[in-house]
Amino acid sequence: MDSVEEQNHPELKEFILAILKEREKLTDFRFKAADDALKVSKEVLEKDLKHLNELRTEVITDRNIFVKRDDYMEWKEQINRSVTQIRTAVNIRTGLAILVALITVIIMAVK
């Protein structure tokens, strides 16, 4: 049953229904726009994550190229010990050479 008011104003009912339909279209449009924006954001995020993973792989690869500090310090100490041993050996040989030269000079002077 139609009410008395609907019978008196059928164009008002159509106007309100048209407004509601337009609002529904606007709401659907907004939801679609939000979905589209979410899809784009997801694609951008996935692209950024892909680049970050590639960068992480490069960093891990590069990290293997460099010497670790502990290894460097150990090698440096070994080299310093070797240099000290070489200097000591050179000093001993130099001293022996000087001693032999002095003995030779003394022997030559005594003859």
Image (cartoon, rainbow, N blue to C red):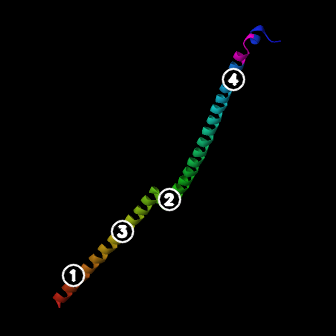
Q: Which residue is mark 1?
A: 102
Give percent across and percent down for residue 47: 58, 49
Which circle's residue, 1 or 4, is located before the other in the chain? 4
Residue underneath mark 4: 18
In magenta, the rendered stretch is 8-13
User: Local crowd at mark 1 within 10 Å, few (<14), some, or many (≥20)?
Assistant: few
Image location of residue 36, percent across then percent down:
63, 39
Comparing marks 3 and 1, which lies closer to the viewer?
3
Mark 2 crowd level (few <14, some 14–19, many ≥20, 10 Å Cα): few
Q: What type of secondary structure mainly makes up the magenta span? A: helix
Name the residue located 35 percent from the left edge and 72 percent from the top edge: 86
Q: Amino acid at mark 3?
A: Val
Q: Position of residue 80 (x, y in %)?
A: 37, 64
The Cα atoms of the two marked residues, 4 and 2, are separated by 65 Å
Q: Nearer the viewer, residue 23 or 32?
A: 23
Above or below, 55 against 36 in this view is below
- Looking at the rendering, which quadrant does residue 78 occupy? bottom left
Residue 73 is inside the magenta segment = no
Mark nearer the N terminus (3 vs 1): 3
Q: Residue at x 75, y 12 (%)?
A: 6
Of labels 3 and 2, the one closer to you: 2
Q: Which residue is mark 2?
A: 62
Q: CA distance from mark 4 to mark 3?
A: 95 Å
Q: Is residue 12 above or below residue 64?
A: above
- In the picture as drawn, the residue positioned furthest to the left comes out as 109
Number of numbered callouts drawn: 4
Residue ID for mark 3: 83
Of helix, strand and loop, which one carries label 1? helix
Q: Residue at x 23, y 83 (%)?
A: 101
Q: Is residue 50 left or right of residue 6?
A: left
What type is the residue that disc 1 sits on?
Answer: Leu
